Amino acid sequence: MASHSAAAPPPLPLWVMFRLGLFQMGLGMMSILVLGVLNRILIKELAVPATLVTLTIAMHQFVSPVRVWFGQLSDAHPLGGYHRTGYVWGGALAFTLVTYAIVQVIWQVGQSLDQAGWSLVTQGWIGLLGLLFAAYGICVSSSSTPFAALLVDVSEEEDRGKLVGIVWSMLTVGIVVGAILSSVLLRQLELDTPIELLQQSVNRLFLVVLTVVFALAIASTWGVEAKYSRYHVRSRACNNPENITLGRALKILTANSQTWRFFLFLVLMTLSLFIQEPILEPFGGEVFGMTIAETTRLNAYWGMGTLVGLSFTGFLIVPRLGKIRTTIYGCWGVAWMFLLLIISGVTQQVWLFQLQLFLFGIAAGVTTTGALSLMLDLTAAETAGTFIGAWGLAQAIARGSATVVGGTALDIGRQLFGVPLLAYGFVFCLPILGMLAAVLLLKQVDVSQFRQQSQVAIAKVLAEDLE
């Protein structure tokens, strides 16, 4: 076990906040590879049915409950003397290796389809692919949950708005960098590229990017926990925090009424924020008559706005308004943007649609920064990993559900109204109601009451050892 000083660690410098953001930048690059490149290859080049592809890829979300376990594991069982760093590095190595294995299985799916059609062998390869995507989700959870807990460990409450703004801005930067790197390394490919050349180019892309992502995970966290972690300082009041098992950690988690309120808020807020994601491009095509290239560029307006919102909220808004008020104003902003989205469809003004997406991105950035900063505050130091796992589970449930709810609501809207604009308007009304309900829940969240209830629950659980 590494030795830890009893003195409080130094404050986290700005440049270290940016260095920590390199990990999120790597995850952003990964998302482009998995949800962009692999999704496209399976559906377009290999002609696997889109429903089957999305269900297979979604396996990485279905395993999200393991986040709570990995969070508790990093709380209770240090690796190499530290609670977070070893898990971050080990998980990063695992998810990069599993991702490369996924690519190789995808080529086997294509070869089997070409030679035998939908045979038992092909179905077996698809099944293996689903298992590998589940393994990918488990590996990402084993790395990203301890990383988020590390953000709690190394920061003070007043700095968390800045830290969240920087780290999650770097996630967006990673998406942009991943998209550019992918386009450069695949630029020689034409629409009807032979599968052998496609396989060679994609394998090279993944080798390069996965190596970079693993290097970023190491570089972002090297030495940070050793110098800046406050975990042991904060948990000294706890007789032996490493004896808090998963069962006891879950007791602490569920004993707090504030935890349940914030969990439900996160689900509602995230669901409302992303319900438009699966239908935004079809909306542009059906209502505005946009081409595929034009609807693809819509993501740029949203992305730029989100980056702006994430960048300035932590530095300018959170310090002035506080985390709860910032998040509430962000939720209101998102609700108004959905109303503006409906208005843009009614008026058929493309410029208004594009402006709405940019403003929507800003509102989403404000909401995300406020909510994530608050999330780090609503985390008991002794069981930080467990709480972070629970918050990650709430977001994963909501992101996974948003695609299903958005698509299903659109089909219901088409049946009810028959007119595309009314069908889409029906869908866009749902997140307005969702954000209003999320605000009502958030107004009942009290950080000081959360801390009081958590300390009582921790003391009660630890007292069980003495009985």
Image: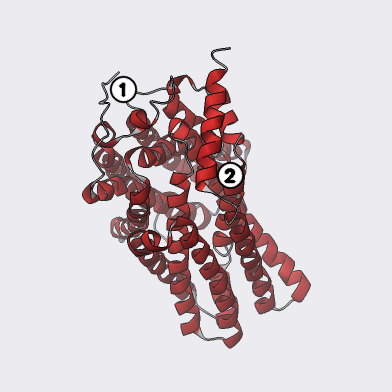
Above or below for 451 versus 21:
above
- Relative placement, left or right, of 378 versus 190 is right
**Above or below 310: residue 355:** below
* Among the two numbered marks 2 and 1 on one chain, the one whose residue lies closer to the N terminus: 1
- As measured in the structure, the alpha-carbon distance from the residue carrying label 2 to the one carrying label 1 is 32 Å
Image x and y of residue 12, in percent = 26, 44
Q: Secondary structure at mark 2?
A: helix
- At x 62%, y 40%, the residue is 119
Is 70 displayed left or right of 263 in the figure?
left
Of 339 and 116, which appears nearest the observer? 339
Q: Please name whichever residue, 422 or 395, is drawn nearer the observer in this view of the structure.
A: 395
Q: Is residue 426 visible?
A: yes
Q: Nearer the viewer, mark 2 or mark 1?
A: 2
Residue at coordinates 68% horizontally, 71% vertically from top-left?
A: 426
Total label count?
A: 2
**Mark sitting on residue 231:** none
SS at mark 1 in the image: loop
Q: Is residue 36 above or below residue 13?
A: below
- Residue 214 at what x, y percent from top left? 30, 39
Q: Position of residue 44 (x, y in %)?
A: 50, 58
**Residue at label 2?**
258
Q: Residues within 10 Å of mark 2 (few under 14, many from 20)?
A: many
Q: Residue at x 23, y 39 (%)?
A: 10
Q: In the rendered structure, which amino acid carries the disc numbered 1? A: Gly
Residue topped by disc 1: 81
Outermost residue on the right side: it is 416
Tell me the crowding category of disc 1: few under 14, some 14 to 19, or many 20 or more residues within 10 angstroms, Cα based. some
Q: Amino acid at mark 2?
A: Gln
Query: Residue, x 47% and y 43% (percent of image)?
Result: 106
